[in-house]
């Protein structure tokens, strides 16, 4: 069996940018005092690799990366870091966000007001399946009984191209 701890230790050794982004993301949610977190769409696992030692992080992705899977019945925070724009539909996550968490945290490219979609740097047909504005994102989560309690630009810097 593959040693997942070794894998996450190797991730930590080889990228300063991923470390910085992960730490900014942790700072963004840490005030909610999470004990158990799900990183949905975790990719290679940077967020888990840089998790505070007292927080349990489950990872789930459709790609064949090392991951824990969804192991807990309930999560303090479910994170969607650069994920929602890639999902064909939201049916697979409905139960998770409606019944299995206290908070949802996410980063997502937001179409700036007055910007033409076809000229926007995040217009990526076939990769980005959804495009959001502040209003459409709030409407999506209101549909699930959530309201926005905090907003910001938690990845700028280092990713100044994220709006």
Image: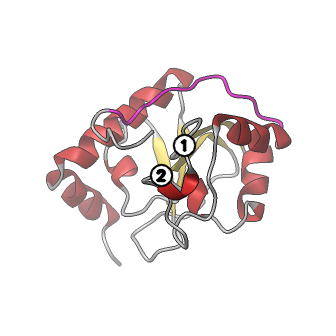
Q: State which region is magenta.
A: 145-156
Q: Quadrant of residue 75?
A: top right
Residue 4: image location, x then y, percent: 33, 64
Rendered-image quadrant of the N terminus? bottom left
Residue name at image x 48 percent, y 48 percent: 57
Residue name at image x 63 percent, y 53 percent: 72
Q: Check the image and tell me how it is coloured.
A: secondary structure
Q: Are marks 2 and 1 in contact (CB under 8 Å)?
A: yes
Please, what is the dominant secondary structure of the magenta stretch?
loop
Q: Say which residue label 1 marks.
A: 115
Residue name at image x 56 percent, y 24 percent: 32
Residue 111: image location, x then y, percent: 56, 44
Q: Is residue 90 above or below residue 75?
A: below
Tag 2's secondary structure?
loop
Q: Earlier in the sequence, mark 2 or mark 1?
A: 1
Alpha carbon distance from label 2 to label 1: 7 Å
Residue 5 magenta: no
Q: Quadrant of residue 155?
A: top left
Residue 69: image location, x then y, percent: 55, 64
Count of residue discs:
2
Tag 1's secondary structure?
loop
Disc 1 crowd, CA 10 A, few/some/many (<14, 14-19, 20+)? few
Q: Say which residue label 2 marks.
A: 120
Residue 92: image location, x then y, percent: 73, 64
Q: Is residue 9 above or below residue 24?
A: below
Q: In the rendered view, does 114 fall on the left or right side of 29?
A: right
Disc 2 crowd, CA 10 A, few/some/many (<14, 14-19, 20+)? few
Residue name at image x 62 percent, y 53 percent: 131
């Amino acid at each position: 069996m593959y040693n997942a701890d070794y894998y996450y230790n190797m991730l930590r050794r080889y990228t300063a940018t991923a470390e910085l982004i992960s730490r900014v993301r942790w700072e963004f949610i840490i005030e909610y005092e999470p004990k158990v977190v799900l990183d949905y769409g975790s990719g290679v696992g940077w967020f888990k690799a840089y998790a505070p030692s007292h927080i349990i992080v489950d990872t789930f992705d459709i790609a064949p990366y090392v991951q824990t899977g969804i192991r807990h019945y309930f999560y303090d925070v479910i994170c969607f870091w650069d994920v929602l724009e890639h999902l064909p539909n939201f049916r697979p996550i409905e139960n998770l966000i409606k019944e299995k968490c206290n908070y949802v945290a996410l980063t997502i490219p937001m179409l700036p007001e007055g910007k033409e979609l076809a000229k926007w740097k995040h217009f990526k047909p076939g990769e980005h399946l959804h495009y959001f504005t502040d209003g459409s994102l709030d409407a999506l989560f209101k549909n699930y009984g959530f309201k926005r309690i905090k907003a910001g630009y938690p990845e700028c810097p280092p990713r100044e191209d994220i709006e």
